[in-house]
Image (cartoon, rainbow, N blue to C red):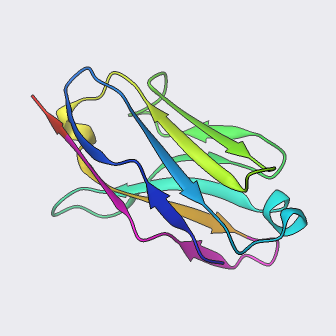
Amino acid sequence: VQLQASGGGLVQAGGSLRLSCAVPGSITSVFNALDLGWYRQAPGKQRELVATVSSGGRTDYSDSVKGRFTISRDNARKRMYLQMNSLKPEDTAVYYCNTNDIRGRSSWGQGTLVTVSS
């Protein structure tokens, strides 16, 4: 599965960004069955889970972004999104989209850089 992430950039603290991840090569029925997620990796730190949305639409968030970020999926467009509000400097990282299929196979996007200035 190929993933194409976009939407990163430079924003001031308190601002918003919307990340998008397309899965263009996936047929709709396959995409619908994928569990989707966003991860991030800050400089010098390990990659961490930010948010997930299951094939059934259940969402889950890390405590650090709960209430500020919203993950969503558009099955018709085969895309996932991460709406990020009230951004903080500690949200600065490379953000990666991820999919997991029913066999547990995982795919990653190329990453998009989010920089939050104080």
Name, please, the residue furthest toward the left: 118
The image quarter containing residue 91 is: top left
| Residue 100 coordinates in the image, percent (x, y) | 69, 68
How many numbered circles does the render carry? 0
The image quarter containing residue 59 is: top right
Task: Point out the stretch of residues depicted in magenta.
Answer: 101-115
Residue drawn where x is 35% and y is 27% of the image: 16
Up/down of 87 relative to 10, above or below: above
Q: Quadrant of the N terminus?
A: bottom right
Up/down of 82 relative to 49, above or below: above
Q: Is residue 108 left or right of residue 65?
A: right
| Residue 19 coordinates in the image, percent (x, y) | 46, 45
Frontmost residue, 61 versus 113: 113
| Residue 96 coordinates in the image, percent (x, y) | 44, 61
Residue drawn where x is 73% and y is 75% of the image: 104
| Residue 62 coordinates in the image, percent (x, y) | 48, 40
Q: Residue 99 magenta-drawn?
A: no
Q: Is residue 33 left or right of residue 58?
A: right
Frontmost residue, 44 versus 2: 2
Residue drawn where x is 52% and y is 49% of the image: 20
Q: Quadrant of the C terminus?
A: top left
